[in-house]
């Protein structure tokens, strides 16, 4: 069997089709697997800025199909593109946090009767969200989708996780299922001497109880008094303005507590951040509930711009490296506290898409449950200093512009985290001092200068945020085993190896950054014309 043969005549259900990985997945299927019968896209409705409800169908037609991921298909089909695409694509309004996925009982059963391949791409990908959002969007959503897929007549289920689900332990990471939660809890107790909930359901219930307690705490008399006093000091106005400020302060406090509690909880369990821990819980859900459903868990490393499809350098939005690359090119990142000799495992998004399609076909053939790492570090390692050198050389040749002048880029010395924080704290303190002096000056020029310094402060705060989240991944070496991924590729015919390329040995990293990735950032994220430097 081949990937092309397997998908012929199949009905698919895809979650996360409007997101960064989902968009090129849908584009790839429409491009090279046009014989699929139908692709259902589970899309949630939303409310726009004006308060108007935007339906799943509206989002399919006006968001997804308007994406530049379909540029080549749009050129091919011209004015008929939308009509042609909608012959294959059908939006189904749903909600992954709902036990029945937001479907009526009739629709739930109808889709279960039809769907033969369920690809679960959706998930909350923020590293440090309010933890209850991530719990619902990742772990509990996985419970709901695997229960749906298990009830299908004869389906294959593919769940997208992350290679960093392994936790904070560096070194070799096997391409295999994690320990069942009960074994993990026992190992954690043995290693740390600290008891944690012994079952997956108890851990989930504990997190839900923690969320409920924090939500109740925001309305405690002590907090409400504090918010009221702060609002009255800040807003010298009507009762309505003060009440609105109280609500804003409550929301800020609540989000901050949920974010901090999530990070502390994840780190106490042995993970670097909320996202990777919730992805671990999601994998546990899939393992515990799947029964005999043929299942593949695909674990990409750090997904970045496309190598080749839908075009070289396609990128939906800022990912992990883009804020750092743009900040460096604009002269706002004088140094970075990374280990220059670690492997930073990056994978182009189209390689992930192609590996997913190969994994679905292999899972249908073999049954059971299998894990596939889609990563580059063991076969074609990219060292952090290699990223810096390629980026530095690029911006020397093609500098960014500020007020019409080229921006000089620094040479990084890779300080320790402590040194880096000290420097940033010192800069922030100096800016605060200057702003206080400027506040006392009545002249217009002082106000303008104050605005400029406030922008610099915002930049430092953003940088501190990125350091807080990304430092573990730029100071720790993970080596993801990829034999099973390589086996998937080698099992393809030469024709399909070309059509569904995910051979990571073909990537030349310096060329990828200088000729594909950074130009892609400029084109798709910064919206600069080719050759423009902004």
Image (cartoon, helix red, strand yellow):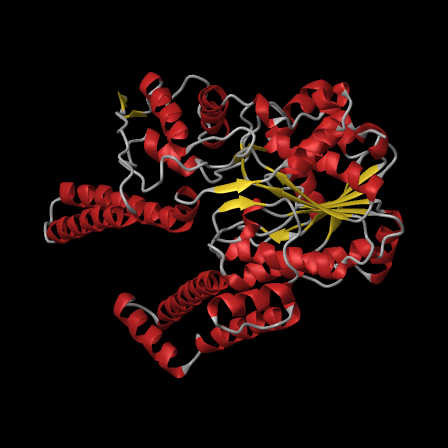
Residue 534 visible somewhere in the drawing: no
Where is residue 156? Give x, y as percent: 81, 46
Q: Nearer the viewer, residue 235 or 302?
A: 302
Q: Residue at x 84, y 56 (%)?
A: 107
Left or right: where does residue 209 sit relative to residue 88?
A: left
**Quadrant of the rendered image containing residue 414:** top left
Where is residue 467? Give x, y as percent: 36, 47
Q: Residue at x 32, y 76 (%)?
A: 226
- Identify the image quadrant of the N terminus: top right
Tell which residue pokes out farthest to the front in this image. Answer: 190
Left or right: where does residue 411 sit relative to residue 530?
A: left
Q: Residue at x 36, y 39 (%)?
A: 339
- Identify the image quadrant of the C terminus: top left
**Quadrant of the rendered image containing residue 19:** top right
Residue 59 visible somewhere in the drawing: yes
Where is residue 463? Give x, y as percent: 33, 45
Where is residue 316? Give x, y as percent: 55, 35
């Amino acid at each position: 069997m081949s990937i092309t043969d397997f998908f012929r005549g199949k009905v698919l259900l895809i979650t996360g089709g409007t997101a960064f990985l989902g968009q090129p997945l849908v584009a790839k299927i429409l491009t090279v697997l046009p014989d699929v019968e139908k692709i259902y896209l589970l899309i949630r409705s939303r409310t726009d800025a004006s308060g108007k409800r935007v339906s799943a169908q509206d989002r399919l037609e006006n968001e997804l199909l308007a994406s530049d991921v379909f540029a080549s298909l749009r050129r091919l089909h011209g004015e008929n593109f939308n009509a042609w695409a909608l012959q294959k694509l059908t939006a189904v309004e749903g909600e992954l946090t709902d036990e029945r996925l937001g479907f009526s009982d009739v629709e739930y059963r109808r889709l279960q009767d039809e769907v033969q391949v369920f690809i679960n791409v959706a998930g909350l990908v923020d590293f440090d969200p309010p933890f209850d959002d991530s719990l619902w969007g990742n772990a509990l959503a996985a419970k709901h989708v695997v229960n749906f897929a298990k009830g299908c007549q004869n389906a294959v289920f593919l769940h997208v996780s992350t290679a960093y689900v392994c936790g904070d332990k560096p070194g070799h990471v096997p391409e295999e299922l994690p320990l069942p939660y009960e074994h993990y809890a026992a190992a954690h107790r043995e290693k740390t001497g600290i008891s944690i909930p012994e079952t997956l359901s108890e851990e989930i219930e504990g997190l839900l109880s923690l969320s409920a307690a924090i939500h109740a705490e925001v309305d405690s008399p002590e907090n409400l008094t504090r918010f009221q006093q702060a609002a009255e000091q800040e807003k010298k106005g009507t009762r309505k303005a003060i009440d609105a400020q109280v609500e804003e302060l409550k929301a800020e406090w609540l989000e901050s507590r949920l974010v901090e509690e999530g990070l502390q909880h994840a780190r106490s369990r042995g993970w670097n951040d909320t996202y990777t821990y919730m992805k671990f819980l999601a994998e546990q859900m899939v393992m515990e509930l799947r029964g005999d459903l043929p299942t593949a868990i695909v674990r990409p490393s750090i997904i970045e711009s496309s190598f080749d499809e839908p075009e070289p350098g396609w990128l939906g939005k800022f990912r992990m490296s883009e804020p750092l690359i743009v900040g460096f090119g604009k002269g706002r990142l004088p140094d970075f506290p990374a280990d220059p000799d670690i492997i930073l495992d990056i994978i182009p998004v189209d390689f992930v898409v192609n590996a997913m399609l190969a994994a679905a076909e292999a899972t249908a053939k073999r049954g059971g449950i299998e894990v596939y790492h889609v990563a580059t570090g063991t076969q074609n390692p990219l060292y952090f200093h290699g990223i810096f050198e390629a980026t530095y050389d690029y911006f020397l040749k093609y500098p960014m512009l500020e007020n019409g002048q080229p921006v000089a880029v620094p040479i990084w010395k890779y300080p320790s985290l402590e040194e880096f924080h000290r420097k940033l704290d010192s800069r922030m303190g100096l800016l605060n001092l200057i702003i206080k002096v400027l506040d006392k000056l009545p002249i217009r020029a002082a106000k303008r200068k104050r605005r400029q310094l406030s922008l610099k402060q915002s930049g430092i705060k953003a940088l501190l945020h990125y350091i807080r989240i990304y430092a573990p991944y730029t100071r720790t070496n993970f080596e993801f085993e990829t034999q099973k991924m390589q086996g998937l590729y080698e099992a393809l015919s030469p024709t399909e190896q070309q059509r569904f390329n995910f051979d990571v040995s073909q990537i030349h990293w310096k060329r990828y950054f200088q000729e594909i990735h950074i130009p892609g950032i400029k084109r798709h994220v910064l919206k600069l014309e080719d050759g423009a430097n902004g």
